Amino acid sequence: MGQAPPYNHMATFVYKAIDTQGRQVADSVVAADRASAIELICGQSLSPVSIERQDEYQAAGGLARSGRVSKADVEAFTRQLANLLAAGVPLSRALSILSREAAKPATAQLWATIHDQVTGGLSLADALSQHPRAFSPVYVAMVRAGETGGFLDVVLEQIATFRSREQDLKNKITSALLYPIILAVLAGGIMVFLLMFFIPRFSQMFAEFGGALPALTRAIVGASRILVGYWFILVILAALAVFAVQRALNSEEGRRFLERVMLGSPLFGRAVSRFALVRFCRMLGTLVGAGVPLVAALRVAKEAIGNQVLADTVDGAIEDVQHGTALARSLESCRVLFPSSVIEMISVAEESSRLDKELVRLAATYEQELDRHLKTLVTLIEPALLFLMAAIVGTIVIGMLLPIFSLQELIR
């Protein structure tokens, strides 16, 4: 997108701001350009949160506001902003450049809003925190640490690298589980097809000849009749069940329950704990390497774990580190997340003052182990699902063939 032409006439800018008492104010102001509008708003003892030219927004039909900023857009924004700051470009100018060069209306609007908020006096972290859909609490915490320590460009580059590796890891997990999910869906589809379209024809034929049907056949025919006659009720019940599960998972207790079940699962427990370990070590190593104090880095890395049950085990370690205990000794109580070998390697790294490098190396090592574990898991799940499909289809076919064996006697 090329540079926007300058505005040579007065225009109306719609804004949201925070007054001195912390209340949000929504209003409009007439000014020659965005910078002048910000000056007028600040002159009213207001802190701008968002500001946009009214006619531009109306011409776009609200697309920028309703559009969605993808993770790839945020990663590109982070890396480009890091490069501009490292080259000595002031933050406000860097944000202005990124908003002008954004390829999508949604991203251009968001970057422009962040620019306005920073120009209006907010820190970059505070401005990003106003947009939680695009910037997670962990992202904001890392930016805040970088601003406080004076190495914002370094932290932004680390964030971009971390997000890239994190996405690669998630893609591996998704790819590993894709085929088993397809098999499960296929098995369910085959079973529904047989019960709704295949079995009714056989059951009608059996009814014409009369005679007692085998117990297995009667059970299959009964299930078929229920599915055909009450499928709409079953669909409604399934939808209600999905809604209830989603609502439960949106609550803290529901999420913790699911996390405990996953951790206790013999199939997925190890994968969940290793995934959390990789995220924790990479985040902590990234922050420590960027110069963030250890206690602050631990608090941010705890949020990056992604599993509240495991994150709770780190709370005690953070308190111990605050009281002067070495990191390795503090993490000894978190055996579910940190194996003994990891504790020892962290201890040696602390003694040799290379904690950041060792944590990043541990993240890479256990990421490879997680990849191997997922491949092994998929190798076991695939034949199990194939066997399940064969068992379902075979049971239905046998149940339908049993009466045929005695069909000749019924005909006589």
Image (cartoon, rainbow, N blue to C red):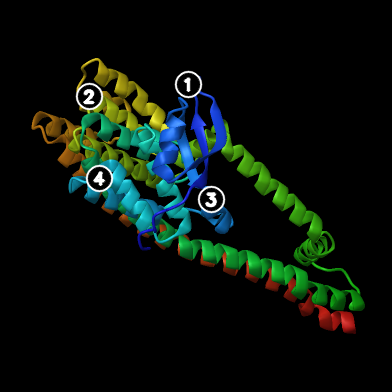
Relative to 169, residue 195 above or below: below
Mark 2, residue position: 329
Q: Amino acid at mark 4?
A: Gln
Label 3: few (<14), some (14–19) or many (≥20) C-alpha neighbours in 10 Å: some
Q: Tell me which label, 4 or 3, sits earlier in the chain.
A: 3
Q: Amino acid at mark 1?
A: Thr
Q: Residues within 10 Å of mark 4 (few under 14, many from 20)?
A: many
Which disc, if any, is residue 125? none
Q: Which residue is located at x 70 percent, y 71 percent?
A: 193
Place of residue 305 in the rendered image (x, y in percent of width and height, measured from the top left): 37, 38
- Measure the alpha-carbon separation of dots 4 and 3: 29 Å
Q: Which residue is mark 1?
A: 20
Q: Nearer the viewer, mark 2 or mark 3?
A: 3
Q: Mark 2 is on which residue type?
A: Arg
Instruction: Tell me if residue 19 comes above or below residue 276 in the rendering.
Output: above
Question: Of the residues tagged 3 and 1, which is closer to the observer?
Answer: 1
Task: Name which quarter of the figure residue 333 lies in.
Answer: top left
